[in-house]
Image (spheres, rainbow, N blue to C red):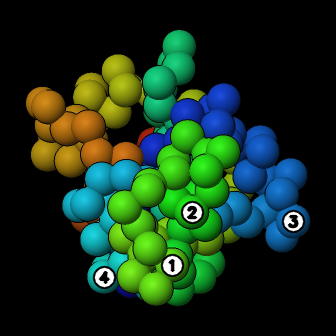
């Protein structure tokens, strides 16, 4: 089993939106970074743990726990001319962008960046590295356990 931190802007899809979705599951659309896409396409497996993270907001941080709920499949927004994620270079027969579905199991309290930075044992968490802007990052098992502890989930 692997673990992931997946960023979503609350105006796009908040943890509340995801929980309100059918089966509390949402497609992780709009990823337009090759490394993040490759994580979904090549490494994520159904059942992998997900830290749902709100970004580009007043208080960014972990706001929910979930899991990968599907195998990768083409992101339909790449073909939708009305979508801000439209990619004219992507072809249906050779899609450039993939996604996975994410099932949110639980909304948590906000575990914000200041608390993550201050926590012992999380110093090398990818999201805390200088210059990291990826929307999807791997989370080591030791970090997953520490974050669950901070959230009172153990």
| Nearer mark to the viewer, of 2 and 3 | 2
Q: Secondary structure at mark 4?
A: helix
Q: Is 76 displayed left or right of 141 in the figure?
A: right
Placement of 130 over or under 46, stated as above or below? above
Q: Earlier in the sequence, mark 4 or mark 2?
A: 4
**Relative height, residue 99 to residue 53 (above, below):** below
Give coordinates of residue 23: x percent, y percent.
83, 70
Q: Nearer the viewer, residue 136 or 141?
A: 136
Using the numbered discs, state the Cα–Cα distance from disc 4 to disc 2 in whole angstroms.
Answer: 22 Å
Residue at 46 percent of width and 85 percent of height: 93
Q: CA distance from mark 2 to mark 3?
A: 24 Å
Q: Is residue 94 visible?
A: yes
Residue at 37%, 26% (x, y): give it.
Answer: 113
- Of tags 3 and 1, which is closer to the observer? 1
Residue at disc 1, secondary structure: loop
Residue at 62%, 78% in the rendered image: 69
Indicate whether 130 appears above or below 2: above
Q: Position of residue 58 (x, y in %)?
A: 53, 13
How far, Cα to Cα, is label 3 from label 4?
26 Å
The answer to whether one can see residue 68 in this image is no
Label 4 crowd (10 A; few <14 / some 14-19 / many >=20): few
Quarter of the figure that contains the N terminus: bottom left
Q: Secondary structure at mark 2?
A: helix
Residue beneath label 4, please?
42
Label 1 or label 4, whichever lies nearer to me, is: 1
Residue where numbered disc 2 is placed: 79
**Number of callouts:** 4
- According to the picture, the residue beneath numbered tag 3 turns out to be 22
Please state which of the two labelled residues, at mark 4 or mark 2, is closer to the viewer: 2
């Amino acid at each position: 089993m692997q673990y992931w931190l997946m960023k979503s802007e609350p105006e796009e899809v908040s943890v509340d939106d995801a929980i309100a979705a059918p089966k509390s599951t949402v497609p992780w659309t709009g990823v337009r970074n090759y490394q993040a896409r490759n994580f979904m396409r090549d490494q994520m497996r159904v059942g992998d743990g997900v830290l749902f993270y709100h970004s580009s907001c007043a208080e960014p941080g972990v706001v929910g726990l979930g899991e990968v709920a599907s195998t990768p499949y083409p992101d339909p927004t790449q073909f939708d001319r009305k979508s801000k994620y439209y990619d004219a270079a992507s072809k249906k027969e050779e899609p450039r962008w993939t996604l996975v579905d994410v099932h949110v199991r639980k909304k948590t309290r906000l575990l914000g960046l200041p608390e993550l930075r201050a926590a012992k044992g999380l110093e090398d968490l990818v999201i805390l590295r200088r210059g990291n802007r990826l929307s999807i990052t791997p989370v080591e098992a030791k970090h997953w356990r520490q974050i669950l502890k901070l959230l009172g989930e153990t």
